[in-house]
Image (tube, rainbow, N blue to C red):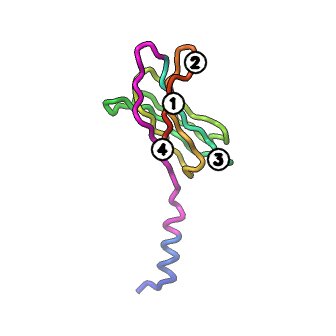
Amino acid sequence: MISRALLSLLLVLASAGVASAGTLTTGYLFRGPTQGSIICLGTNVGAKNVKSVRVTLIGSDGAVVGSQMCINLEPGGSCQTAESTSSHCEVVFSGSKQSMRGSLLIVSSDGGTLAVEPAR
């Protein structure tokens, strides 16, 4: 029979290798025919580098229309992908949800922001 101490040690060792990860998603935004781009943006608002961030634009049919992977994103840094297809945004990252923010933007062809949908 395994002693409680040994069982506790095994549980601690098994959980030590589990990395935390987070996912933030937005609602769907429709891009009109005369509007510029849709941008999926993930920003590191923490004090440390975020090991990995993937931002993905997903169309109404569930297909990925744009994706970008960023490694060792510095504090204040952003990872983004832009397309011209109506979609929603997904930000998947390593670490704590307190360290990341995400948003979906529609920008005009001259760079002005037309709409912003925060990720939750």
Q: Name the disc covering residue 46, or none.
A: 3
CA gap between label 2 and label 3 equals 27 Å
Mark 3 or 4, closer to the camera? 4
The residue indicated by pointer 2 is 111
Do the numbered discs 3 and 4 sit on residues whose CB atoms are within 8 Å? no
Question: Which mark sits nearer the N-terminus, 3 or 4?
Answer: 3
Do the numbered discs 1 and 3 sit on residues whose CB atoms are within 8 Å? no
Mark 1 or 3, closer to the camera? 1
Q: Which residues are magenta?
A: 13-35
CA gap between label 3 and label 4 equals 16 Å
Q: Label 3 is placed on what type of residue?
A: Gly
Residue 119 shown left or right of residue 30 in the figure:
right
Q: Secondary structure at mark 4?
A: loop
Residue 26 vertical position relative to residue 82 in the rendered view, above or below: below
Question: Which mark sits nearer the N-terminus, 1 or 2?
Answer: 2
**Residue at 68% across, 48% down:** 47
Q: Label 1 is placed on what type of residue?
A: Val
